[in-house]
Image: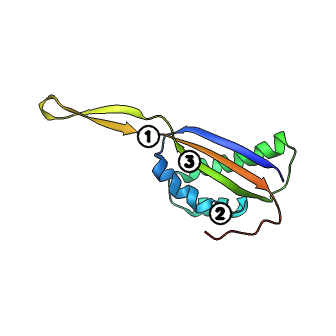
Amino acid sequence: MSEIKAKIKMLRIAPRKVRLVARLIKGKTVKNALTILKLTNKRACTPFIKLINSAIANAAHNLNIKTNHFYIKKIEVNEGPKLRRFLIKARGRSTPILKRTSHISLILENNPNKPQQNQ
């Protein structure tokens, strides 16, 4: 059993919104996760599809593993730095606008006998 890692940093989607998609695919096989992501109507699904494909490519290139029996062992969404902007208001005031970013880390594991988890 080997672990395959992939990361996305500075994704310009708020972590709260990204975690909704991450919970859908945690513990699923890669094939099922990709199917779920393609059928889900969220903006964060596209980066997740790219991340999973990147992890599979890492396995093929770095570890010479050419199997599709991966499952998502761990997926973590952390908050990245915030872009700080200001909105000008009446009477010379301003209010802050925080444009949040996300860091996503994914760990796949190669285990063909792993049962499907229902969460």
- Element type where label 2 sits in the image: helix
Would you say the residues marked 3 and 1 are in contact, meaning their CB atoms lie under 8 Å apart? Answer: no
Q: In the rendering, which numbered label is found on residue 77?
A: 3
Question: What's the image's color scheme?
Answer: rainbow
Mark 1 / mark 2, whichever is N-terminal:
2
2 relative to 78 in the view: left or right: right
Location of the C terminus by quadrant is bottom right
Amino acid type of the residue that numbered disc 2 sits on in the rendered structure: Thr
Residue identifier under label 1: 100
- Residue at the spot 37% in from the left edge and 32% down from the top edge: 84
Closest to the observer, 40 or 114: 114
Q: Residue at x 69, y 43 (%)?
A: 6
Percent position of residue 117, x then y: 68, 68
Mark 3 and mark 1: Cα distance apart in space: 12 Å
User: Which amino acid does the dot numbered 3 rest on?
Assistant: Val
Q: Is residue 68 left or right of residue 74?
A: right
